[in-house]
Image (cartoon, rainbow, N blue to C red):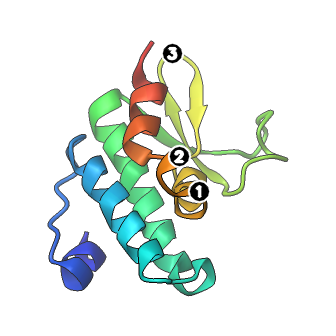
Amino acid sequence: MSVARSVSGVELDYSVASLEQVDGLISGFRAQGVTEERFAETLFGFGCYVGEVMVRHAGGKWTTSAGTALEAYASFPLLVSLPPQNLSNPIGKVFKAFRNAESDSVAQFYRAMTTN
């Protein structure tokens, strides 16, 4: 992800292990006092990255919340559908991780969503 590389020198490789780096980047930006509004585009990109890791390593596929029970509750319309029938909101999770600090980890989110 070019934002991570240009801002912090971190090279994200779409591996499951790289989600720990995403957690670290999010924590670092929050510690620097960056506001969610100023950082929203980057957070959205990190959410897409987390979702793509789920697609590549957990058999997920991108879908939308339209027509699902989550439509009214999903903070973003892009979701990842994981086998057997789990829907996850990685973009919303990244924003939540930014707001809630260490109590919300995207690496832990991946493990929780991909463990049957």
Q: Residue at x 47, y 51 (%)?
A: 102
Residue 103 circle label: 2
Please give left or right for residue 86 compared with residue 57 in the image. Answer: right
* Number of marks present in the image shown: 3
Q: Nearer the viewer, residue 109 or 77?
A: 109
Q: Secondary structure at mark 3?
A: loop
- State the residue lying farthest toward the right: 72
Residue 100 circle label: 1
Identify the residue under disc 3: 84
Relative vertical location of residue 42 with respect to residue 115 in this rendering, above or below: below
Amino acid under disc 3: Pro
Please give left or right for residue 47 compared with residue 76 in the image. Answer: left
Marks 2 and 1: in contact by CB < 8 Å?
yes
Q: CA distance from mark 2 to mark 3?
A: 27 Å
Label 3 neighbourhood size at 10 Å, few (<14), some (14-19), many (20+)? few
Amino acid under disc 2: Ser
Q: Residue at x 36, y 56 (%)?
A: 23
Relative vertical location of residue 94 with respect to residue 43 in this rendering, above or below: above
> Quadrant of residue 96 in the image?
bottom right
Marks 1 and 3: in contact by CB < 8 Å?
no
Q: In the rendering, at what x and y percent does residue 38 appear? A: 56, 87
Relative vertical location of residue 26 with respect to residue 29 in this rendering, above or below: above
